[in-house]
Amino acid sequence: MLETFPRAARINRDHGVRVVDLVPDDINWHGAFPVLSELDRHQDIAEFMRTYKTEYNKGLCYSAVQEDTGTQGWLSVAGYRIMWESEPSTLIVEDVVTQANARGSGYGRILMEDIERVGAGNGCSSLIVDLGSRAIGVAESGFFAALEMQQQGNQFVKSLE
């Protein structure tokens, strides 16, 4: 686990949003989980929380983008961890999703750039988004290419050095 997690909310005034770290049992999960569940592999919040509690102790972190007013709810969610065992260390993004009606608005980019700063600040040499066995759509390929990430199979990779 990152020593500084959870961090204070980070405000992005240009987009009127804030990035918030979500720990297990955080009250904010009631708003953020519906966005995460759009990935289809997270269907039940109780089951997700059980898994997240276990994985949190193994270094898994989640961050989310919320409108700064807090009235419109949650826009984008991502789960990530640093693989300290690799030399040099690598930041792996396991889940990343933006609410369907908010896609293309820059919220995913804000979240990924925040996560990239986490990796760079912790000495990671690269950031990898691992989509597992999911098919990669054109929109996803374009999103990750805009973040200057290179596709390698079902992963997108970016050097942080």
Image (cartoon, rainbow, N blue to C red):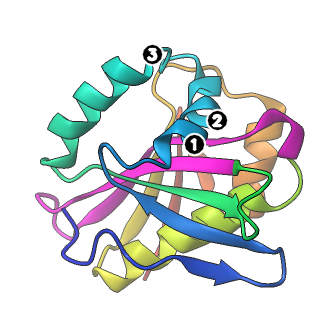
Q: Are marks 2 and 1 in contact (CB under 8 Å)?
A: yes
Picture residue at 21% right of the left edge, 47% below the top: 56
Chain part drawn in magenta: 75-102
Pointer 1 residue: 32
The front one of 111 and 70 is 70
Query: In the image, is 43 to the left or to the right of 17?
Result: left
The front one of 13 and 123 is 13
Cα distance in 3D space between marks 3 and 1: 13 Å
Could you tell me residue 121's position as x and y percent? Answer: 35, 84
- Name the amino acid, label 2: Val
Query: In the image, is 34 to the left or to the right of 82?
Result: right
**Mark 2 packing: few (<14 Cα in 10 Å), some, or many (20+)?**
many
Picture residue at 20% right of the left edge, 38% below the top: 53
- Name the amino acid, label 1: Ala
Callout 1 secondary element: helix
- Looking at marks 3 and 1 on the same chain, the residue that comes earlier in the sequence is marked by 1
Pointer 3 residue: 44
Could you tell me residue 122's position as x and y percent? Answer: 28, 79
What numbered label is drawn on residue 35? Answer: 2
Quadrant for the N terminus, please.
bottom left
